[in-house]
């Protein structure tokens, strides 16, 4: 006689309420996810509509032709030195969070690790690079130039705190509140010329970069650039071109310029040592050297 299977007497049929409970448990998350997707779609659609209503500005329209007189204005409100005096006191607070989220301080530090000898930093602004210069004694002197007195005041104040990080290897430091275009390279040459986020705010960036290159020592000089500009993605440029005018009105810079094209137009005076791009191609990191250097 066969023995009954263990547990056969106590087996209970599945409760018909179980599938219903499981269904109810899934309903709420699905509704929430659907509502979130709907809201995101509405916001994205509204944003695209707003962008489509803005007039795009081709990046070359933000430039002043090289043949124009020095005081001539661009067709747009780009070169506005007064805007930097207006925003100088709040500038660091306004952009600090965004820069940290994008990892810009890390990019500054990595770029400036190549700085050595006598260093010239053009358009130094509020001195956001000061905390990233190497402190091992490789920098002999540091000359900081900016055309905004307001920005330069913040930079000098910041240096009084940050100079201590250099210890007994603090470089000789000079502050020059002047437009770099008005300074002759015949005064002095430098081993390193630094420019970060400056080509976006001058009317003729090609002539400006050529002028910067003339300060670099012809034997071992270099030019270090960290800039923002056009992306390698069309949809990103669509956004940049339509928001560039408003950004320039607030910050005095056009962030839709083609930095690669600007550098190529200086290839008769500068060689590219290295180039990297980050953030969908909108951040450019360049190391350049004067053309006359012997390889």
Image (cartoon, rainbow, N blue to C red):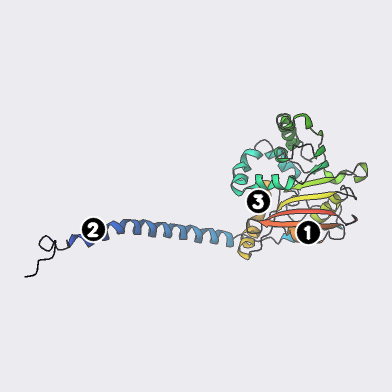
Residue 61, can we see it?
no
State the residue at coordinates (68%, 50%): 248
Q: Residue at x 48, y 57 (%)?
A: 43
Closer to the camera in the image, 18 or 283: 18
For mark 2, does the 10 Å Cα neighbourhood hold few (<14), some (14 to 19), or many (20 or more) residues? few
- List the residue tagged with mark 2: 21
Q: Tag 2, which secondary structure?
A: helix
Which numbered marker is on residue 145? none
Report the quarter where the N terminus lies.
Answer: bottom left
Q: Which residue occupies the foreground of this view, 232 or 170?
A: 170
| Distance between the alpha carbons at the discs numbered 2 and 3 | 53 Å
Q: Could you tell me which quadrant the C terminus lies in?
A: bottom right
Instruction: State how far apart marks 2 and 1 are (Cα).
Output: 64 Å
Q: Where is residue 209 in the image (x, y as percent from the top left)?
A: 82, 53
How far separated are the C-alphas under marks 1 and 3? Answer: 20 Å
Residue placed furthest toward the right: 186
| Mark 3: secondary structure | helix
The circle drawn on residue 247 is 3
Q: Which residue corresponds to the image point at 85% horizontal and 51% vertical from the top-left?
A: 213
Q: Position of residue 103 (x, y in %)?
A: 62, 48
Residue situated furthest front in the rendering: 1
Residue to which mark 1 is pinned: 262
Q: Given this view, does label 2 or label 3 mark the residue nearer the observer?
A: 2
* Label 2 or label 3, whichever comes before in sequence order: 2
Residue 231, horizontal then vertical, whole percent: 66, 60
Residue 290 makes an appearance in the image = yes
Disc number lying in front (2 or 1):
2
């Amino acid at each position: 006689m066969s023995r009954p299977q263990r547990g056969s007497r106590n087996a209970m049929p599945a409760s018909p309420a179980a599938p219903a409970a499981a269904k109810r448990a899934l309903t709420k998350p699905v509704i929430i996810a659907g509502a979130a997707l709907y809201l995101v779609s509405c916001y994205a659609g509204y944003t695209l509509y707003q962008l489509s209503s803005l007039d795009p500005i081709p990046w070359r329209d933000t430039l002043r032709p090289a043949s124009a007189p020095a005081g001539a204005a661009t067709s747009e409100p780009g070169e506005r030195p007064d805007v930097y005096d207006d925003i100088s006191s709040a500038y660091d607070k306004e952009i600090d969070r965004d820069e940290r989220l994008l990892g810009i301080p890390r990019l500054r530090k990595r770029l400036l690790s190549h700085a050595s000898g006598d260093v010239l930093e053009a358009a130094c602004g509020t001195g956001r690079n000061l905390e990233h210069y190497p402190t091992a004694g490789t920098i002999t002197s540091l000359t900081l130039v900016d055309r905004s007195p307001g920005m330069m005041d913040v930079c000098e104040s910041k240096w009084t705190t940050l100079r201590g990080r250099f210890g007994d290897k603090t470089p000789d430091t000079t502050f020059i509140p002047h437009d770099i275009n008005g300074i002759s390279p015949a005064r002095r040459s430098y081993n390193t010329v630094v420019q970060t986020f400056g080509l976006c705010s001058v009317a003729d960036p090609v002539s400006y970069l050529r002028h910067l290159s003339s300060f670099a020592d012809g034997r071992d000089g270099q030019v270090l650039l960290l800039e923002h500009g056009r992306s390698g993605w069309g949809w990103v440029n669509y956004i940049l071109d339509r928001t560039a005018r408003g950004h320039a009105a607030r910050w005095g810079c056009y962030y839709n310029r083609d930095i690669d094209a600007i550098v190529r137009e200086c290839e008769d005076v500068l060689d590219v040592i290295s180039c990297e791009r980050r953030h969908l191609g909108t951040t450019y990191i360049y190391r350049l050297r004067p053309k006359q250097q012997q390889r």
